[in-house]
Amino acid sequence: MELRRGLLMTTFPIRIALLGCTGSVGRQTLDVIRHFPDHFRVVALSARSNVALLAQQAREFRPDLVTCFADTPEIEARARAELPGVVIGEQGLLAAATHADVDIVVAATSGLIGLQPTLAAIGAGKTIALANKETLVMAGHLVMRAAQRAGVSIYPVDSEHSAIWQCLRGEQNSEIRRLLITASGGPFRSATPEQLRSVTVEEALAHPTWRMGPKVTIDSATLMNKALEVIEAHWLFDVPYERIEVLIQTESIIHSMIEFVDGSIKLQASLPSMHLPIMHALAYPARLPAADSGLIRELSWPDLARLNFEAMHPERFPCFRLAIEAGKRGGTYPCALVGADEEAVDLFLHGQIGFLDIAQLIEAVLERHHSIEEPDVATALEACNWARQTIRELHKKYT
Amino acid sequence: MELRRGLLMTTFPIRIALLGCTGSVGRQTLDVIRHFPDHFRVVALSARSNVALLAQQAREFRPDLVTCFADTPEIEARARAELPGVVIGEQGLLAAATHADVDIVVAATSGLIGLQPTLAAIGAGKTIALANKETLVMAGHLVMRAAQRAGVSIYPVDSEHSAIWQCLRGEQNSEIRRLLITASGGPFRSATPEQLRSVTVEEALAHPTWRMGPKVTIDSATLMNKALEVIEAHWLFDVPYERIEVLIQTESIIHSMIEFVDGSIKLQASLPSMHLPIMHALAYPARLPAADSGLIRELSWPDLARLNFEAMHPERFPCFRLAIEAGKRGGTYPCALVGADEEAVDLFLHGQIGFLDIAQLIEAVLERHHSIEEPDVATALEACNWARQTIRELHKKYT
């Protein structure tokens, strides 16, 4: 089955390695594949620790390769018992990422675990569907350079970058005047500093429009998540920070926009859904008939009735400001940012620090950081680990 | 100067014949050209009767050819006096449309006068920037077939079709699920039939978001204009009527949208401006830096704050329903529709009939019409003239 697009063509079935198959994006990727069985084939599945779900997925999709990172010997033992032939540890991820029969590697692991496999997949000439934020934030310079060298495409999987990518079809990066990345604003977009001081974990986890894991939900409440998206957009679309803005779009219907140099603006919209950006990355340049088949719900504009837009006030969101600064400074600042944020959010989720302490701890870490320019992977990971440790030390010291 | 877009390329300066140079679109086309003197050159200017403005434009842009349709001997005499070398009558339009040095013909005449010159320009291999509605409504089958045969592109110049065209860049017509053509709804979008009965000419001319000539403003109030846009979109984008919908977007900021088969929706936005669709048609595929230079005002989303969407209720707008029916029936029905509407709107503007009589007269004419399938140009014009005359007879008979 072939779909021609001028010179571009999608040849189905597309053969997929799915790294992070038991996480939220991983499971929704399998929803898309389940919905279009003639269009996709799962060649490799990689999970971290959820052996039961991995085994169930393996029975359903019958991949050639199943791998499990297995943080502990118990998980490894369980994986070996349930999944004969399973490959354990990082070598499993690397084997999946470079499997000879794979066309697209979906990089949907969380945290730093995905960086090396993504670079390996690029080296092996695989198209990357990138759902992992840390990869570009920490190593955008390495990833984009490697992709260019290998002639490999990096397709974004989150809704904001997918929106920009869709609006950029048939357009030129050089004719972008501004990227307008939309944000729901999270639960505290109108909160005063006083109100923010007493935010509880439950309040911070109550996101108005999207259902996500706890770490990214807290990152959405601090707008750290939005700043990481700005850094990603900078790398993905080769647009300087000065031309990337964040705009509050309360309903999360407009997923982002491009303003072109002629003043024309293109927007992409849908009801909030991760299936859509996943599907777009898997099938590009084809669009699959997911609206009539019910995978994507139809947006009724008269029922929606109204879209609201507001300026984002960076002064209310210190994490946003710190992250953009780290992005602009470059070097290992973004790596320290990622590590510091992971650790600070973890402390908040465990009730050990307040909501506003997240930014204060991250700022203290970034102030102490000695950045190294153009870090390689080891240096990037080291800066990240240094920041995690420094957060913990600072927290111990002041409590 | 060359701008490459994959295989597409714009070679500047682009050489332009402007048919209808003294009308609203014609003057705004010259604004764009004046703004980008290195990108465009005016080769031919054609006006109907405004000799004073034509002479002024000719002095400024120094075209190789100036033509004047000159409805009366007085206008012809004035044109010959002021413009040595002017070509008079339809042969002037034809000469401009087929001038050897012209790349793009901007067809911005009003009414039926533009049909023959547009077909002649297509025959001569010129790209068409089409601002004239009647051309596609009356002769879409002839124009699109001729364009396909000649390998010529038809670029739309109004904001709705330009929005669809922009959203379609890098996409496939076959992956369109629905075209959503937006409408401000005009001044009477929430009026009751009782209120509509007593509408005055002044009320109907008070359009909430766009400033246009009187005929098109009345057509906007009856939503006839929107139905003509649906018929145009059907021809331009080869989309069946069943997949074209009209949606009220009160602020006229979203100029239209495409919903694709995967459920993703792309929208195009700007402050209301004709300069933008004109510029896009002239420079395509390039986008010119008109935002920084001030020709196109920047849209501030936080200042805008809100976009409103409503369903369009066709039962409130009988002209809309009649026009869509005429479009679907095809043959010479759309030609009769155009003639009947021109005449009925003229009667309304002269205070001779009421607002609701416009639709009633058009309906009576369409009921009496004997349609001819696949009309040629002469047959199309004849059906249009028959409808004008029939409106006048019906009006005389019943008053």
Image (tube, coloured by chain):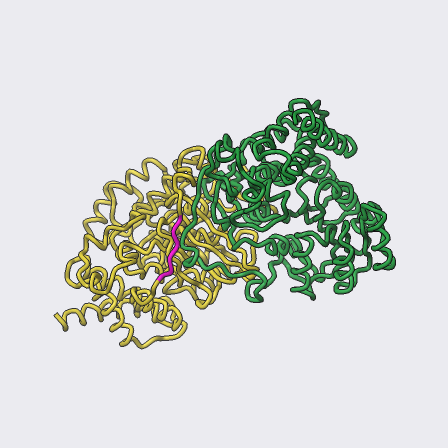
Chain colours: A green, B yellow
* Residue A294 in the figure: left or right of residue A30: left
Hey, which residue is sitting farthest front in the picture?
A399
> Can residue A162 be found in the magenta stretch?
no
Residue closest to the far left: B399
| Residue B353, image quadrant | bottom left
Name the residue at 31% across, 60% down.
Answer: B223
Examine the image and state in which quarter residue B309 appears.
bottom left
Task: Give the quadrant of residue A355.
Answer: top right
Image side of residue A335 versus residue B67, left or right: right
Asked whether residue B309 is drawn in magenta, I would say: yes
**Frontmost residue, B73 versus A119:** A119
Which residues, given as a range, are shown in magenta?
B307-312
Q: Is residue B150 visible?
A: yes
- The answer to whether one can see residue B16 in this image is no
Q: Quadrant of the C terminus of chain A?
A: top right
Q: Position of residue B20 (x, y in %)?
A: 33, 49
**What residue lies at 82% left-to-right and 46% top-to-bottom?**
A72
Direction from residue B167 to residue A43 in the image, left or right: right
Asked if B397 appears above or below A366 in the picture, the reply is below
Q: Is residue A382 above or below residue A119?
A: above
Residue at 71% across / 22% down in the picture? Answer: A370
Quarter of the image containing the N terminus of chain A?
A: bottom right
Decide whether the magenta segment is chiefly helix, strand or loop: strand
Left or right: residue A253 versus residue B316 is right
- Residue A350 rendering spot, x and y as whole percentages: 65, 39
**What is the total number of numbered labels drawn onto the structure image?**
0
Q: Give coordinates of residue A64: x percent, y percent.
A: 82, 59
Say which of A386 and A41 sits in front. A386
Position in image of residue B265 (x %, y %): 51, 55
